[in-house]
Amino acid sequence: MRIEDLDFSKLRAFQLVATHGTLAAAATHLRLTVPAVSAKLRRLDDVLGVALFRRLPNGLVLTPAGERFLRDVTPLLQEAEQALANVQSGSSAHADETGSLSLSIGGDYTAYFVPKLNAFLSEFPKVQVHMRVSRSSDALAGLQSGKLDFCLGIYPRLPAGIAAKVVARTTLSLIARKADSGPPATPADLVTDRLIVAPRGTAMRQLVRKLDFAAEPMSLLECPTCQTAIDLVRLGSGPAVVHTSCVRRAEAPDIHALDLGEKMGSLQLVVLYRRGSRRTVAAQAFFDHVTR
């Protein structure tokens, strides 16, 4: 295989399906039909000579080769987006656009949104962006009152007047330090008398209740972010339940990760906004950037 055999449309289709978990979601983003996206994945498999997904009755699941490819290709696509933004910024029609945007973002999700935010800032260099990390309740109150334009993160329950655009989805993974165990086969192979959980908001708490290996009297250590949990695992504090997407981004070769899968449930990463609110040119452009 040569680099000339690849094209960004196939790579983007692969990334979207891997991120969202369904062909339909990727098709919506790409403005293609589901069969067209499926065909791109088949052609990508043929070019690479490996299967990137296992096709199950209830959806697609990444193979080990697919996991590795997603980890490697995501920075490539992010850099391509940034290159486009950089080359367009000098002659951008929005280079003189002014105004301000106020955002709230969950601490664990900044890695997903930062490349998209940076591309927006390159296109709108004079727009002031105010970004803060807030608790879900505070973020929702700010959005409802008009103090915030958008909220980015995981919000399982939405108040009246607030709408959500799903941009990604993640399952949960059980992780442990490699030095503490061999390759995990089941959750019971990893669990001790302590389980680290992060971030244990409402959505995560609901999923943790489904874990039969997390029943009382096991001690639960709650962390503010998945990265904190991953660091504690590396130090030998015990196994942890974290977002699968956070494990992929952490590039942690020194830990075992066992994806608990769709049966255990998944969480949706969303962009929230007020229904019926009028958007400025910059606000609409930001929304378009982060929901691509």
Image (cartoon, grey):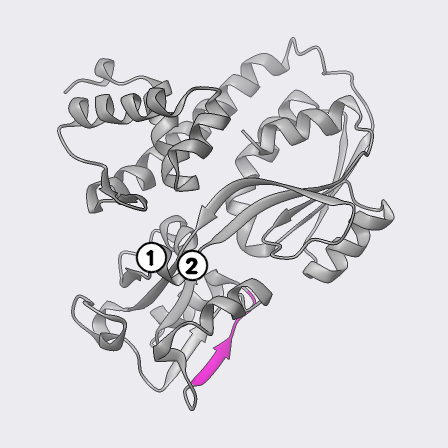
Front one among 2 and 188: 188
Name the residue rendered at 47%, 67% in the picture. 207
Quadrant in the rendering for residue 161: top right
Residue 214 picture location, percent across and down: 40, 79
Predominant SS of the magenta segment: strand
261 left or right, relative to 4: right
Residue that protrudes farthest toward the bottom in the picture: 217
Please give the residue where the numbered disc 2 appears in the rendered image: 265
Residue 237 visible? The answer is no
**Distance in Å between CA atoms under marks 1 and 2:** 7 Å
Q: Which residues are magenta?
A: 219-224
Q: Please, is residue 71 above or below residue 93 in the view? A: below
Residue displayed at 20% across by 41% down: 65
Q: Quadrant of residue 21?
A: top left
- In this view, the residue in front, 135 or 264, is 264
Query: What residue is drawn where x is 37% and y is 19%?
Result: 9
Q: Which image quarter is the C terminus in? A: top right
Tag 1 residue: 261
User: Mark 1 belongs to which amino acid?
Assistant: Gly
Secondary element at tag 1: loop
**The N terminus - image quarter:** top left
Give left or right: position of 271 versus 58. right
97 w.r.t. 199: above or below? above
Based on the picture, tell me whether residue 257 belongs to the magenta stretch.
no
In the picture, measured across the screen, residue 7 lies left or right of residue 289, that is left
Circle 2: residue type: Gly
The answer to the question of whether label 1 and label 2 lie on touching residues, with beta carbons closer than 8 A, is: no
Q: What secondary structure is found at the residue carrying circle 2?
A: loop
| Residue 182 visible here | yes
Instruction: Give residue 50's position: percent from left, percent from top.
Output: 15, 33
Residue 182, position as x, y percentages in the image: 16, 70
Report crowding for label 1: few under 14, some 14 to 19, many 20 or more residues within 10 A (C-alpha). some
